[in-house]
Amino acid sequence: MATLERDVVIIGAGPTGLTAAHELRKAGKTVAVLEARDRVGGRTWTDVIGGATIEIGGQWISPDQTGLYSLLEEFGIETYPRHKEGTSVFVGPDGKRIEYTGEDFPIAPEKVAEMDKLIAVMDELAAQIDPDRPWEHARAEELDMISFHHWLRTLTDDEDAATNIGLFIAGGMLTKPAHTFSALQALLMAASAGSFSNLVNEDFILDRRIVGTMQGVSKTVAAHLGEDVVFLNNPVLKLDWSEEGVTAYGATVTVSAKKAIVAVPPNLYSRISYNPPLPRKKHITHQHQSMGLVIKVHAVYDTPFWRAKGLSGTGFAPTQIVSEVYDNTFYEDTRGTLVGFISDVHADAMFELSEEERKARILADLANFLGDEALTPEVFYLSDFGSEEWTRGAYATSYDLGGLFRFGPDQSVPTGAIHWASSDLAGEGYQHVDGAVRMGRRTAALIIAALDGTAHDPAYDGSVPVPDTAHA
Ligand code: FDA
């Protein structure tokens, strides 16, 4: 058992923890990062499966994600565009398959108009919401009392329009049924991405990928931190704390430090035994944040066969098990890869099936979108973060009804020497790697200011490397 003394101990080597470590080191602070897994990157994770590079976790970056973009720039990491050329496919509730171009689903014009009306309402409200403080909106309490499902139905009588719009945030983002979270939570999701229009525009939100994979970003930062900074296979199950400092106990490394950053998703905070116990409000707050559930489907073919048919590989089917599909061919790969998503209750249903039944059911949906060639992939793999002990769901956590207004203001307030940070607590970039980078930078800036006895700029948004003025 090694015992270390550092300025800051960071629990979790995901993008949040590693970005914080990097910023702290740049400011001359000593750091140790204790990571439970045998790898860095957390919910970003790449593996080579059947000879194909598969991004099992987070992978896409959108144009507004300047927190992550500035980190990529710092390390000279390149991006490449997702393949988007060609027509898209829509499979309606009647199972009818329609090829289309443009942003609108090929449904009746009056339904498109109704969806546009809902999008306009969402955009207007999202523009009024500060993603760092959604609970401060004048209607926050009211909007947090009603489920997103029911709120949409107060705005329209068109069931299809409400279902389609609901899916963009429910199945598509929070990966929970729309009746389990509030309208305010949905508006936070929209505000965190700039607008609801951005979220429903797959060409924006799924714009580009990282040449060396998204996990590669964490690997690069960890390598830059050097030896004796990141300690893998060191789950922290016990944390002593006071106002003055902390001691974190990993499996083989114990670290005493002036500050700790718990950079793990909130649903895992209670894996750690705190001594003394956390204050009442902290005990309660994080019990109201829970992970969604989504299966990310990967199917690799010897060629991107859909491109030869003029198809982009993009498909939507609001009532299918696999509700979205995209061309996910990896950088410079000559083969073709599709990625699909199966959310919330559909994911539950898939895990009830045998492995063969599950595969057949999922491939049938891919074939509905793109043709029977989809039935015979060379590689078939399902990302299952729900069974990962150190994540327990995907993509991220969100509050239950009423939780965001009631507990949100306390979610990031430090407890003695402990700071809490992860993409789940981010405003801008919420649930995304961009939010993780921003939270890492913001938390590091806060700690640097506290350790140096300097003023901290509370408006610092983490979008660029910590400027000297942030704690001048
Ligand atoms: P993260 O969960 O990544 O890291 C936390 C780390 O803490 C983990 O390494 C974990 O092992 C460790 N840990 C937990 N408990 C511990 C303990 N007690 N002791 C020590 N270590 C502990 N985002 C995006 O921008 N674009 C995308 O396309 C996607 N897509 C996507 C798909 C899937 C399937 C998933 C699961 C997620 C995404 N995301 C995404 C979300 C993105 O991956 C996520 O927001 C960030 O990885 C969050 O980074 P954090 O560092 O905050 O947490």
Image (tube, rainbow, N blue to C red):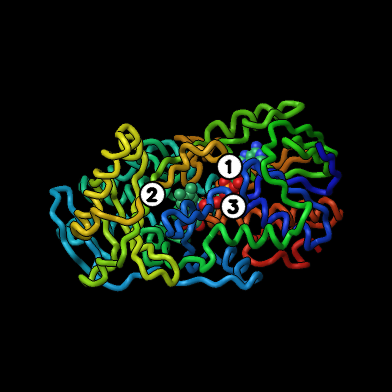
- Which is nearer the eye, 73 or 459? 73
Secondary structure of residue under mark 1? loop
Q: Amino acid at mark 2?
A: Tyr
Instruction: Tell me: is circle 1 under 8 Å from ligand 1.
Output: yes
Location of the C terminus by quadrant is bottom right
Name the disc covering residue 265, or none: 1
Give residue 36's position: percent from left, percent from top: 64, 41
Q: Which residue is mark 2?
A: 381
Q: Determine if residue 128 is in view.
A: no
- Which is nearer the eye, 415 or 10? 10
Secondary structure of residue under mark 2? strand
Q: Amino acid at mark 1?
A: Pro
Task: Give the vertical position of 136 relative to 333 (above or below).
Answer: above
* Residue 260 found in image quarter: top right
Characterize the local packing of mark 2: few (<14), some (14-19) or many (20 or more) Cα atoms within 10 angstroms. some
Give residue 238's position: percent from left, percent from top: 72, 31
Instruction: Tell me: is circle 3 under 8 Å from ligand 1.
Output: yes
